[in-house]
Image: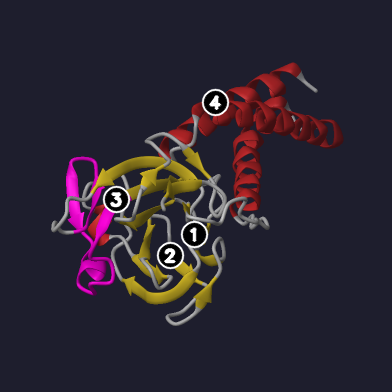
Amino acid sequence: MRWEIAATSLAFALVFLPLLAWKWRVQVKTAIAGGVIIGALTGLIVSQIGFATGLNTAVLIVLELPLILLITAAVLLARFYRDPERSPTETGNVILSPADGTVVYVNKVEKGSALVSTKGEKRFRLDEITDTNLLPDTAYLIGIDMNILNVHVNRAPIAGKTLLRKRIAGQFMSLRRQESETLNERVTTIIGNGSFSVGVVQIASRLVRKIVSYVKEGDDLAIGQRIGAIVFGSQVDIAIPELENLSISVKIGDELKAGISVVARFG
């Protein structure tokens, strides 16, 4: 491998990938590791092109950035469309995470107050839930941020029947915008087991063009069963009711896996 090709490939990748990491809320250390790997792979490929074609160094350097973009896109798409099989390790008296991602807030809902979703300093009403009276005793609303590297298939946090599956159309805005919670498209699902109900709110982001639903109202669901997926970056909120001996098991910054991680215990 030519040293100048290797050096420029690494430099391009180590600048480009951390910028994407910041934009898409991916850990910088992950971006740096990816930059090293993709930069080295790009340098190797471009060097081989140079040996095979005899192109000069300047032309080869011009080829590097498009190739980095192509390899990065291929890796992201391969990771995004993962849908691994999962079986809950706990199913009794637990509420599981509906999404892979990072906990961004754990909000206590005061008795008798409206159910709202929090984004920064702003608070937004989730009227599609409160208007139905299916979750009148909501105690906590937990927000889970999903970055582009997370598995984007969402799962049922409890076993039960789908009582509500409602899509709220909206504009596609960045989740960094304070008003995005009310303007972004979202799909709200309420699952009841006869004793209590839990709400799941799938929120689209600026790059999203659809939220895919796998279930409909009236369907019986197993705990951890797939209920839908959101394309690329997104957020999922879970509304948890007041239950006997309720204990929230997560805090801000925790990394969760859908259908595996316990977000609350009760009973």
Q: Label 2 is placed on what type of residue?
A: Arg
* SS at mark 3 in the image: strand
Residue named by callout 1: 231
Which element is circle 4 on?
A: helix
Q: Where on the picture, by quarter, is residue 249?
A: top left
Along the polypeptide, which appears first: circle 4 or circle 2?
4
Horizontal and vertical percent position of residue 3: 74, 17
Disc on the earlier residue, 3 or 4:
4
Q: Is residue 160 above or below residue 256?
A: below
Residue picked out by circle 3 = 140
Q: Earlier in the sequence, mark 1 or mark 3?
A: 3
Q: Residue at x 59, y 22 (%)?
A: 11
Question: Image point 61% across, 29% down: which residue?
Answer: 35
Q: Which stretch did the figure color magenta?
A: 115-141
Say if 94 sits above or below 213 in the image: above
Tag on residue 29? 4
User: Circle 2: is it few (<14), some (14-19), or many (20+) Cα within 10 Å?
Assistant: some
Q: Residue 199 in the image: x percent, y percent?
A: 36, 63
How much space separates mark 1 and mark 3, taking CA atoms? 26 Å
